[in-house]
Amino acid sequence: MRFESYTVGTLLMVSTTVTAFMSVNPGKVRQSSSLSMAGLQAESFGPASALRKLKSDLPQIEWLAEGGGNPNNKIDMPDHVKAILDQPDAPKRVAESDERTNKIRGRADEAAADAAELRGMLVGKEDESAWWRKQRDVPKGGREVTKDDPLTVLVAGGGLAGLVTAAACHAKGMKVAIFEQASSYAPYGGPIQIQSNALRAIQSISNECYEELVAAGTVTADRVSGLKIGYKKGNKLAGLYDAGDWLVRFDTIGPALEAGLPATVVVDRPVIQQIFVKHGIPEGTVRIKSRVSTFEDLGNGQGICATLEDGTKAYSDVLVGADGIWSQVRKNLHGLGDGAGGFAASGAAGGAIDDAEARKLARDTVKIAESADRRFSGFTCYAALAPHRASNIEDVSYQILLGEKKYFVSTDGGGDRQQWFALIREPAGGVDPEPTPEDPHPKLTRLRKEFAMDGDGDEDGNVWDPFALELINAASEDDIKRRDLYDGAPLLATLDPQRIISPWAKGPVALCGDAAHPMMPNLGQGGCQSTEDGYRLGEELGTVTHTKDIPWALGKYSRVRVIRTAIVQGFAQLGSDLLVDFDLMMTIPLLGPFFLTMTQLSMPWILRFLYTAEF
């Protein structure tokens, strides 16, 4: 793995400087009583709390806040981004059209239909005679691994991490099987941004999968991305900003071109699954309605025995836990509490969850997280894929509207659709009221108040830029899903020597994806880092010539991946935590402009670190 010391040093300098002024105390909260919602919102503490109190105690001089924002901050496409997009080898924007919309949406419908009909899945007689059902007679000390007698790998979880891992192992000649707990590949969570680093990993595994993904996807690197202020803020000393003014604008294609990587694309989740099932792994690799409950390391290079929830036994040389943030494999591997393995409300499994199940899951997850040693981020997230052509779609592919205690993220979902996320600070376990005749759309009701664009604004008196409600109102109540966001410690919160040497692996068992490093969505790198994991797992297992060497190969994979993912994971956490006091930053002379300048200057370096061809 390659690291750029200057890049990492720059990132650490920026994070250290900013976190000295902006912190979150999840224990100190205030009631959102006017919304009649369960859950409390966070307030700042430490230096940020002291600064906020000092500011409120000072005389308020109204004329300092009078006036309009800088006209340059209203321009979507600044000259520095336009210059990069005009380069000969940069992708050129193709305007939205009915033909392209029908193509993108039609492909998604086709993939969803394939999933519903279980095409490519392991069913019937093939299931009854599957290779993993029979325990091999392996001598103590293990066996030789050859082309005719390859390594065998079981993958728990059929989301992106599991599919890429299986494809990488298959490409190296291994025999693979995937156990997915869902009854079908439901189209949950909207499209996935496959950024340049992840595309290179997929290209290295299977050029056919790569070409299919690029053909099926929508390029998002051909426009501007950045941060906006959600409502009028600032003063004459720190800078004045109107609602919707740009704070930071950047491109994602420049760093990708520097590294010789392809442009980021967004692809529907069922389409990604369809492509890997058809082109990345043999037919009959994925077995649905199958969750790995426990496993036994048979020792002496003799492999593992995995037990599914229905009692079925499965045997192989290697087990990979790609079963999400509430991983059952991780629970068993690390000896966590009985409640640590929960239902994965993401990836392939989450599509089956309705609002009633989501309410129960929100409460249950609080208990699961305690047993699973996961960190509640402090945010609840409302998300939807709205069938809507955004008003700025031709110039902007990704933007965040920043505000006090909440922010609104939107990205091009392809096919005249916008994928949006409304992240709101409040403790875990909160739920929306059930629909009533008086309020049949409780989620929409809340969001319209949180991002109010007229009258008195939200409960803090902030009148939001209309773009948030443009997208919120384009979604139906049923389209909107809510869940609390959890992640994990960037590195290890343990003194266990074995886990320090091999953080995500023990014996013939390893973790990858969210099971190993769940992260906040700010950088859009959760699935991308999972893809890198899958590639690296295939590479390391591909070197094994004897089953006694499996623990060493998995340990090396774990050590290679943990530092890079910890950096990405840590900065994704930081990106969310900083936003609680963003409004405070914008009113402080010198500090506010310095923060914005450092953020603008650091973005190319952050992207250069992410967009590497070596992982």
Image: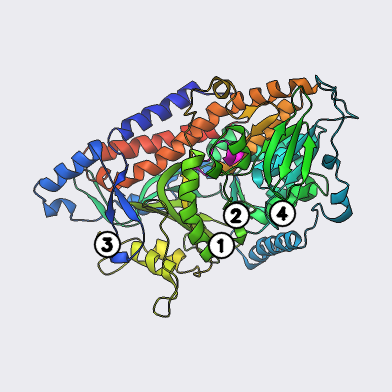
Residue highlighted by disc 3: 459
- Inspect the image, locate mark 2, and give the three-letter code of the amino acid beneath it: Pro
Q: Residues within 10 Å of mark 4 (few under 14, many from 20)?
A: some
Residue highlighted by disc 2: 191
Tag 3 and tag 4, C-beta contact below 8 Å: no
Residue 389 visible, this orientation: no
| Segment colored magenta | 513-524
Image side of residue 563 versus residue 544, left or right: left
Tag 2 and tag 3, C-beta contact below 8 Å: no
Identify the image quadrant of the C terminus: top right
Q: Please state the horizontal and vertical placement of residue 208, each as a whole percent of the image.
A: 77, 44
Q: Please state the horizontal and vertical placement of residue 560, each as a whole percent of the image.
A: 60, 24
Tally of marks: 4
Q: Earlier in the sequence, mark 3 or mark 4?
A: 4
Quadrant in the rendering for residue 351: bottom right
> Marks 3 and 1: which is nearer the front?
3
Residue highlighted by disc 4: 289
Quadrant in the rendering for residue 540: top right
Residue 479 visible, this orientation: yes
> Marks 4 and 2: which is nearer the front?
4
Tag 4 and tag 1, C-beta contact below 8 Å: no
What separation in Å lies between label 2 and label 3 (alpha carbons)? 32 Å
Q: Is residue 551 highlighted in magenta?
A: no
Q: Earlier in the sequence, mark 1 or mark 2?
A: 2
Residue highlighted by disc 1: 417
What separation in Å lies between label 4 and label 1 (alpha carbons)? 31 Å
What separation in Å lies between label 3 and label 4 (alpha carbons)? 45 Å
